[in-house]
Amino acid sequence: MESQKIYQMGKIMLANPVAGSIFRGVPEFTYYKCHSESDAEFSLSMPCRVISAARYRFGPDFAMNGHGSDTYDILFIYSGSVTVSGHKTSFTASSDDVLFLHSSDSYGIEKGGDAPLDIAILRTSGLLASSYYEIITGRSPRPIRITDRDRLSGLIEKIVYYSGHPSDMNNVLIAHTMSSIFVMLYMSGSGGDSSHGYPQWLSGTLDYIEKNLGSNIDIPALAEKSDMSESLFYRVFRKHTGVSPYRYIINSRIDRAQTLLRTTDLQVKFISHTVGFGSVNHFIAHFRKAVGMTPQEYRESIRQL
């Protein structure tokens, strides 16, 4: 059996992986776990705060229940399956599904099948989490199927890193990264129910941006394609995504760059060009602002895990 590694990126949780849950099960393997107990006024004032983050592989014994505190749990299933039951709903979630649950929900989660369960668990609180929970689930949780697991994994790893290096700036970056996760869930979370998804024109716009990050993306042309004036386009884009079109494009390029830095040995200069930055200096400046370190420093920090 492979040796267990615990990545001590923050205050290690000595008890349950998700503090406050009714949790049962001993992990076979721990990928990472951190627990922030910061009560700094600045941290508590942020629109979204991450209380804990963990990723585990469980054998046959895993269960989790709702609890009393006013928090939100995001569970990402890398492999395996779980059965969720409650007074509102009952369903099965499996590989590449995300569960977005509120602590007040009356639910029980049991491991399903014989295959090991590989699962990441984020506990969050704050107005941003509350608002997106309402929008995404309509207070009726269900599985959210994710199509880009590498991007979600990268965002969770950023959360873990920032949580393990507490500072006012990293609290801001945590809120920013959680916003990206919520938007990702929002985009995927309609689950066939368009009432909770983006309008068709915006889904098409975001898909175009994702497929053309390496090219020059002309925002006025996007507005024209959507049959809107630039001012209206900016306004409704921000209303749905929480950021301006320009910031969304930059954030998407940074997320793509992080994936390439984690998964390839490509030179920073080549990655800069691949994700659509005009110069490597421009890329490094944006990357440092978003992530808190240079691309090379980020790559080295990931490889130390």
Image (cartoon, rainbow, N blue to C red):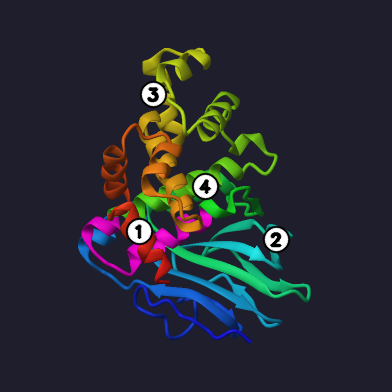
Q: Could you give the CA–CA distance between mark 4 and mark 1, rounded to whole angstroms? A: 34 Å
The x and y percentages for residue 147 are 63, 47
Q: Could you give the CA–CA distance between mark 4 and mark 2, rounded to whole angstroms? A: 20 Å
Q: Could you give the CA–CA distance between mark 2 and mark 3, rounded to whole angstroms? A: 36 Å
Mark closer to the chain start, 2 or 3: 2
Under mark 1, the amino acid is: Tyr
Taking the magenta stretch, the answer to whether it contains residue 157 is yes
Q: Secondary structure at mark 4?
A: helix
Quadrant of the image occupied by residue 198:
top right
Neighbor class of circle 2 (other Cα within 10 Å; few <14, some 14-19, many 20+) is: many
List the residue tagged with mark 3: 234
Q: Majority secondary structure of the magenta segment? A: helix
List the residue tagged with mark 1: 298
Under mark 2, the amino acid is: Ala
List the residue tagged with mark 2: 93
Q: Look at the picture and state if 146 lies above or below 118.
A: above
The x and y percentages for residue 106 are 61, 66
Q: Could you give the CA–CA distance between mark 3 and mark 1, rounded to whole angstroms? A: 32 Å
Residue 84's disc number: none
Q: Which residues are magenta?
A: 152-171
The residue at the point 33 percent across, 62 percent down is 162
Under mark 4, the amino acid is: Glu
Under mark 3, the amino acid is: Tyr
List the residue tagged with mark 4: 134
Taking the magenta stretch, the answer to whether it contains residue 2 is no
Mark closer to the chain start, 4 or 1: 4
